[in-house]
Image (spheres, helix red, strand yellow):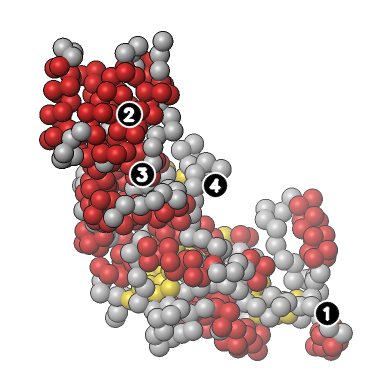
Amino acid sequence: MTVRVRFAPSPTGYLHVGGLRTALYNYLFARKHGGVFLLRIEDTDRNRYVEGAIENLIESLRWCGLDFDEGPGAEGDVGPYIQSERLEMYQRFAQQLLDNDQAYYAFDTAEELAEMRTRQEQAKVPSVHYERDTMRNSLNHSAEQVQQWMDEGQPYVVRLKIPDQDVFKMHDLVRGDIEFKREHVDDQILLKSDGFPTYHLASVVDDHHMGITHIIRGEEWLSSVPRHLVMYNYFGWEVPKMVHLPLLLNKDKSKLSKRQNDVAVEDYRTKGYLPEALVNFVALLGWNPGDNREEFTMDELVDAFSVERINKSGAVFELDKLKWFNKRKVHELSVSELTAQARPALEEAGFDLPSDETLERIVGLLQERLTLSNEVATLGSYFFQDPEEYDPKAVKKRWKADSSDLAREFADTLEGLESFDAASIEAALNAFAEEREMKAGPMFVVARLSVSGMSGGPDLFPMMEVIGQEACARRLRLAADRLQKD
Ligand code: GLU
């Protein structure tokens, strides 16, 4: 049997890193078993509709290298893959349950339900439940009454009739056998008053009709499983195998939240993280290869991945670890790939960019100093514009009373050079220092500070070569004026 798995996000406007992890594990599982990875958009909650959210999601998945085999824009045999385009089907299956006395109509207003809840809370029942007996529904009212309410246009929902049994049992491939007590299983709403299905009905109907063999999703959905099992049973459908992934946690072990971390994949993208690093990092949040390997390409992940090695306990999201991965991947990339990654930030910064060839040389000079691709635009801003500031510590300690004069004279020297390559600049600087019977070291400092504003950076002479003769001379004079000490 071909493995078929799905990533089924609700389009909230961005791809959450937790969603990325779910998508990734599904993807790896599918690739590992030669199966199909499907994207299904669960957009039946109309209140949460966000313009452009689907495109955004797909773009983020693509950026991470998670290509789906079936989904919006990649139609297979079991589409459409957007739930709002499948409403008729959910209504049909809700009707089937109604006809078989496995679901019922309920007319209760929000106020009536709130009263019921208060009543139960006051009575300290173990968990709040829909009360079939006391509320307004087709189980405890006559068909005529129900028809009358409908004719009057009273809004209603369809609820699942959970059977009377003490426990509901399921098997999770990672967590093993799990039992849910009856008191924790409510008569779930299946169809809302706007005719849209809830997540529960839609996902069960779709998982079945899309031939899903394995459901891999976040732990927060575990408590929904008993209601789903009831539906599978009523419909007479086989239950897919299930895996629930551990929670992602902040450093303080609370549930991963926006307040403590960026949670959108696109935030990491704009900050200069590489997809390879994010994927590698996220892969290890809740799974381990069983040995001490940490660095993986996507292909290596496919190879190493197994459901058995998914952890049960929550995984802490450590940004420093992600940075470490990013640094490693930034250093591994070819210069042209890194240049492509850095380009959007450079454009965003509004720099006048040099030729592609020069840009690649710049990126090549900076590469080993970068953690994020975007740092080409920040740490390396002096490659594109005259420095606006000078490292104050270095200025205080190392820009001496005679440094400004030296800078001006060295500017003249540089302008006199016939060839402005690294070797000539180096020779010129050494000769300049020698003529003045000074060490080359302090001249290095004057040149570096003037040209870049920084006290550290890539090798000075290749850097000056790329920045160019005219700009170097200009910057030396600019610094001389700005930093003049009496
Ligand atoms: N739409 C749900 C979500 O947003 C999907 C849950 C599931 O995978 O069943 O995560």
Marks 1 and 4, how far apart at CA: 40 Å
Q: Which residue is mark 4?
A: 258
**Whole-percent x and y of residue 31?**
27, 69
Residue bearing mark 2? 476
Q: Nearer the viewer, mark 2 or mark 3?
A: 2
Residue 380 shows in the view? no
Tag 2 near tag 3, CB within 8 Å: no
Q: Earlier in the sequence, mark 2 or mark 1?
A: 1
Q: Is residue 414 left or right of residue 404?
A: left
State the separation of the CA atoms marked 4 and 3.
34 Å
- The amino acid pointed to by label 4 is Lys
Q: Is residue 14 above or below residue 147?
A: above
Give the residue type at disc 2.
Leu
Q: Is residue 484 left or right of residue 163?
A: left
Label 2, ligand 1: CB separation under 8 Å: no
Q: Nearer the viewer, mark 1 or mark 4?
A: 4
- Cα separation, mark 2 vs mark 3, equals 16 Å
Q: Earlier in the sequence, mark 4 or mark 3?
A: 4
Single out the mark in the foreground, 2 or 1: 2
Q: Which residue is mark 3?
A: 384
Q: Which mark is residue 154?
A: 1
Labelled pair 2, 1 in contact (Cβ < 8 Å): no
Location of the C terminus by quadrant is top left
Q: Nearer the viewer, residue 343 or 228?
A: 343
